[in-house]
Image (cartoon, helix red, strand yellow):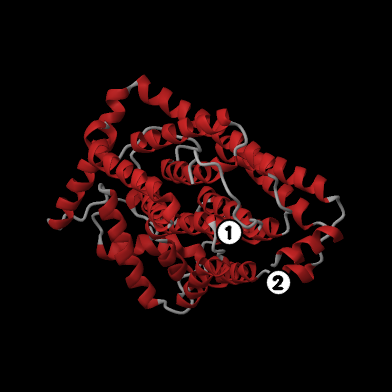
Amino acid sequence: MQINDTKLVNKNSFLPVKLRIQIALVALLGILVGFFLSRAMLSIAMILFGANALLGVHPKYWVKQKWWWIGLIWVLFYVLSGFWSTDLEYWYTRCETKLPILLLPLAFAFTPQFSIRQKTIFWYILNLLLLIALGYSSFCFFSNAAFYIKGYNYSHVVPTLPKNDYIIFSITLAASIVWNIYIHPHLARLWQRRINVVLIVIIIIALHLLAVRTGLMCFYLFLVGWSGFLLWRKKTRNYGLLVVSFGLLMLTTTWKLVPTLHNRIEHTLFSWDMFQEKNMSGDYSDIGRYMSYEIAVKLIQKHPFLGVGAGDLLDSMKGGYTQWYPQVPDVQRLIPHNQFLSVALACGIPAMLIFIAWVLYPLTEVRKNREGFFFVILWGMMMIPLMVEPLLETQFGVFVFLFFLLWQRHTMLHSQPSSVQPALQIP
C-alpha cells in the first residue's frame, strides 16, 4: 500500500489518528511484555493492536495488501490439509500458530506513522525487557556456573526467557542489536546515545555468552552486511573499517575467552566427527537436523502435491524415523528443522512455492535509503532460522519472525528522505 492510501484509510477510521497511534504503541509494548512474560498477554495485546488498526477500515483496502494475500493462501493450505489429516488436534495447533500471519501484516499496514519520540519509548521498553531477561539468565548461570559451562558440551543451554526457548531468545537479541543501531542517530539526547552504545555492547556480550549458533549467525551476518554498507559509502568508510576490525577481533578472541562459546564450538566439532563416522544418533543436534531433512525429503517425494497433512506432520516423521533410523528414541524424533521442508511435507510442494513467494515478496518494497538497508539485512537474518528451525510452527517463532520484520518494514515504508546527521554517531 502506498503512503497516500494509508493516509486516506486513517481519515476514514473511527478514531482520531493521534489516538490510534497512542493505542497502537501501547498495544505494541504490551506485545513485547507478553512475549517475555505471558503468552496470554501476548495474544490479548496482539488482538488489541489488530483491532485498533483494522476497525473502520473498509475491506476493499485489505485486498490491496499483496503480501497479506500471499500469506493467506499458504496458511489456507494448512487449513485445508485438515481434510487429509488424521490427528485433528495437532492440525488445529499448527493452524492456530499461523493466525498472526493473517493479522499482523494487515495491522502494521494500517497503523499510522510513529514519531521519533514514540520509537524512542519502544527502544526504552525493548531494552528494559532485554535487561530483565538477561538478569534472569545471569542469575541462573551464576547460581551454578560450573554446571552450565559443562552443559554446553552436551548442548544444554542456560535458562532463558521466554519459556527457556534459547533459540528464540538469541534471535531476539540479534534483532534488537539491529534496532538499537538503527535508532541510534535518532536518539535526541547525548546521554541516550551513550546508554545505547553500552546496551549494544551488553547484548553482544550476552549473545556470545549464551552461545546459541542461530543467534550468533544472525549477528555476524548483520556485521558483514553493515560493514559492507558503511564501506560502500565514502563518508562512512572509517566506520566500516572500525566494524570490520571489531568483527575480526570478536571472531578471533571470543571462542577462546568465553567458556560457554568454547564448549559449544567443541560440541559442534565433535558432532561433525560423529557424522563423519556415520554415527547417526539423535544425541547430537546437528546430526538430528540432518536426519530430519533426509526423512522429510523422502516423505515429500511420496506426497509431493498435497503433503501428509499438517495434522500428521509429526506422526509421519516418527514413522520415517522408524523406517530409516529406528535407533533414535521417540523423544528425539523431530519434525523437519527447516521451515520450507515443513511446509512442503505438511501441505505439498505447491504450498511451499507459495510460501517461498511470501518470504521473498517484502524485498519488492525495499527503498534505497538507510531504512531500506536495515530492513533487508534484518530480512536476511530471519532467513537463517527459517533454514535451520521449524520457526513458524511455534507461537514464539511466528512472533519473532513477524514482529521485528514488520516493525522495521513499517519504519522503512514511512521513512523520509535522508537528512544530514551529526558527525559523531553510529551511521
Q: In the rendered image of this protein, does residue 251 appear above or below residue 80?
A: above
Label 1 sits on residue: 98
Quarter occupied by the N terminus? bottom right
Res 366 visible: yes
Q: Earlier in the sequence, mark 2 or mark 1?
A: 2
Give the left or right position of residue 105, taking residue 171 as reference: right
Label 2 sits on residue: 64
Q: In the rendered image of this protein, does residue 132 appear above or below residue 409?
A: above
Which amino acid type is marked by label 1? Answer: Lys
Looking at this view, is 361 or 5 the one in front?
Answer: 5
Question: Counting other residues with Cα less than 10 Å from the Cα at mark 2, is it few (<14), some (14-19), or many (20 or more)?
Answer: few
Which amino acid type is marked by label 2? Answer: Lys
Res 86 visible: no
Give the left or right position of residue 82, taking residue 382 as reference: right
Q: Is label 2 or label 1 in front?
A: 2
Position in image of residue 9 (x %, y %): 80, 62
